[in-house]
Amino acid sequence: MKKIQIISGPCSAESEMQVMKTAEALRTAGIDWFRAGLWKPRTRPGSFEGMGEKAIPWMQRVRDEFGMRICTEAACAKHVFTCRDAGFDMLWIGARTTSDVFSVQEIAEALKGSGMPVFVKNPMSQDIGLWAGAVERLMMQGINNIGLIHRGFASFERSVYRNLPKWKEVISMRSLFPELPLLCDPSHIAGDARYVREIAQKALDLGLDGLMVECHCDPKSALSDAGQQLTPDEFISLLNTLNVRSSDNDSPDYRTKLSELRSEIDLCDETIVEVLARRMKVSEEIGRIKRENNVSIIQPGRWDEVIEAAVLSGKDKGLEESFIRDIFNEIHKASVTTQEQ
């Protein structure tokens, strides 16, 4: 069975008692990595913004008494230097900070030569370029002990989740950096403890390498993100019910069936490419006719008809509307480019 990395602890380090009680329960459950936020970036002033450096001795107690490795979020160079001097084992860059290239650059320069591992959460916005850029800034400083954390994307779309998973974007990021460990933070995606398990299982089904789950000894009294944190008992139950899939299977029957289906996929892909090439040839001819008749390339009414017909056809065949729209919008952009030539 594939071994996954589990990092857990409260959203914020609120008191020494809270930190130690939570850490003891997690250590009893066999967890090696303890997380807690010391500095909490909040949208508006006046909210609980973390205990800051006051909480460092509490984290050090967790390390010294329970043998756990400790980690927290760093949002600036000062945080990096402070945590490095205090013996923290790992840092992560939060979603708000990932969105700020100047802060990422500052953190990268502060981490240079430290050897300290750093994980990078995806930005708030659905922008893979920002996420990849943060990783590249770290790499340019010679930092190679880097990981990724998927915590969902802010959106105006209606959802039961606090942040949308957008798994397609996560898969794209994995394709860009296949060598980097990729964890999921189901707590921040869910925003509600009731949905943490289903998101965690989806992440493992997709082959992600581990989870960062928020756990608090008394979530109802938490000073930040109370609704999404699990109790230690709930956390242990989560671990016991998750299905960690193997990365491969040596069964001859499995390999034979997989090989047959992959051959079929290859034929489908070849057909798709041939059809797309033929479509682009038609688009090229349409562009020529439009130019000869002094007609604009983009005609929104016509495109609306095309995509709506595709969506209806896709639904009849069991395909999701968003999937069809994404594909056809990319085809449309390529078609417009072809007609412009």
Image (cartoon, helix red, strand yellow):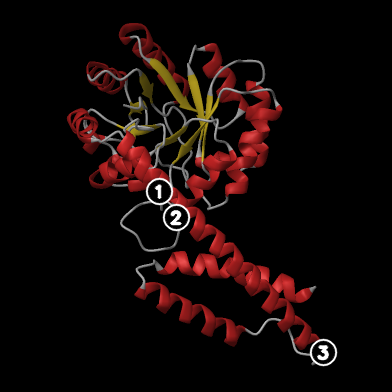
Q: Is residue 219 above or below residue 290?
A: above
Report which residue position mark 2 lands on.
264
Q: Residue 32: which numbered mark, if any?
A: none
Within the image, what quadrant is residue 46 found in?
top left
Q: Horizontal placement of 80 versus 170: left or right?
A: right
Q: Quadrant of the N terminus?
A: top left
Q: Which mark is residue 260?
A: 1
Q: Secondary structure at mark 2?
A: helix
As measured in the structure, the alpha-carbon distance from the residue carrying label 1 to the one carrying label 3 is: 49 Å
Disc 1 to disc 2: CB gap under 8 Å: yes
Give how far apart the Cα atoms at labels 2 and 3 are: 43 Å
- Eye-nearest disc, 2 or 3: 2
Residue type, label 1: Glu
Q: Which residue is mark 3?
A: 292
Where is residue 127? Give x, y as percent: 57, 51
Residue 287 point in image, percent of width and height = 74, 81
Q: Residue furthest top?
A: 64
To which quarter of the image does residue 276 belong? bottom right
Q: Nearer the viewer, mark 1 or mark 3?
A: 1
Could you tell which of marks 1 and 3 lies nearer the N-terminus?
A: 1
Q: Residue furthest bottom?
A: 293
Where residue 166 appears, as percent x and y from the top left, is 44, 52
- Report crowding for label 2: few under 14, some 14 to 19, many 20 or more residues within 10 A (C-alpha): few
Would you say 203 lies left or right of 135 here? left
In this orientation, does residue 203 appear? no
Q: Is residue 52 placed above or below 41 in the rendered structure?
A: above
Q: Look at label 3 and name its amino acid.
A: Glu
Query: Secondary structure under badge 1?
Result: helix
